[in-house]
Amino acid sequence: MALSFNIHNPGAFAFGLLGNVISFIVFLAPLPTFIRICKKKSTEGFQSVPYVVALFSAMLWLYYASSKPDETLLITINSVGCVIEIVYIAIFVAFAPKKIRISTLRFVLLLNFGGFCIILLVTHFLVHGSNRVKVLGWICVAFSISVFAAPLSIIRLVIRTKSVEFMPFSLSFFLTLSAITWLLYGIFLKDIYIALPNVPGFIFGIAQMILYIIYNKHEIAGEMTAAAAAAAATNSDKEKQDSVEAIEVIITEVNNEDKDKNLEVNGLIRNPNHV
């Protein structure tokens, strides 16, 4: 299939091009996380589910776009997305504990290989003509929503731990921006399958940013409280040390006075006619 741009629809072309740029940034947003994983050689509390599901979604959108004309912008970004997600998953598997590594590989084989092959075979041999695009469209809608809903596990972790360590704000922000852009692209293109899943994507993105603001304030307040407590403890220790030193000085002075008195008494005893 030859690649062609939908330039006869300026709105769709503009938002599709902008969507490519923003989605590329979204794909790169977890990069600091994986740099951290490589440096620490541990996946810590991070999960592989969002990246496995994102890879599967990108594969489906490639299949959907190849079944329609003038979908070059959808093909380009999802091709890049597939490559990036595969790299992320490879890094995660390399540094994950054995149990998590095995479960991740099983999930990849089940979803990205087995699931995609089943969809490919069913839609190719059992669905024909325009119905194929409709079936693929609804499948893409379902799994695109899964991609946006995948961070719900991270949201639960944030609420449970009251920490935003594993939910970067940049990722939530660009996911929301990407959802808005592709929503407008779908509207201009009059493609419900592209527009529809970006509605919950926008909602989930806003929810994540609100949670980040709330719990990030809690972390800052906690750090300030801990710093104040540490400073108070340091001052208390210093005051105690000063008190001990003052008492030692007093004791030393008293001992010196007693020693001087003893010397005077001893002198009088040895020289009674001195006066």
Image (cartoon, rainbow, N blue to C red):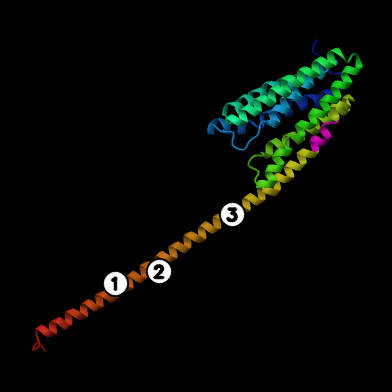
Task: Identify which amino acid the numbered label 3 is placed on.
Answer: Met
Q: Is residue 130 at all visible to an observer of this figure?
A: yes
- Can you identify the residue that label 2 sits on? 243
Residue 14, image x, y percentages: 81, 25
Which region of the structure is painted magenta? 196-202
Q: Is residue 179 above or below residue 224?
A: above
**Is 60 placed left or right of 44 in the picture?**
right
**What is the spatial separation of the Cα atoms under label 2 and label 1, in whole angstroms?**
14 Å
Mark 3 surroundings: few (<14), some (14-19) or many (≥20) residues within 10 A:
few
Q: Residue at x 78, y 21 (%)?
A: 60
Amino acid under disc 2: Ser
Crowd class of label 1 (few under 14; some 14 to 19; many from 20; radius 10 Å): few
Secondary structure at badge 2 equals helix
| Residue 275 placement (x, y as % from top left) | 11, 89
Q: Tell me which amino acid carries mark 1.
A: Thr
Residue under pointer 3: 224
Helix, strand or loop under label 1: helix
Tell me where residue 269 sits by quadrant: bottom left
Which residue is rendered at x = 59% and y = 52% of the image?
223
At 91% from the left and 16% from the top, the residue drawn is 130
Q: Are marks 3 and 2 in contact (CB under 8 Å)?
A: no
Which numbered tag is attached to residue 252?
1
Q: CA distance from mark 3 to mark 2?
A: 28 Å
Q: Is residue 41 in the magenta section? A: no
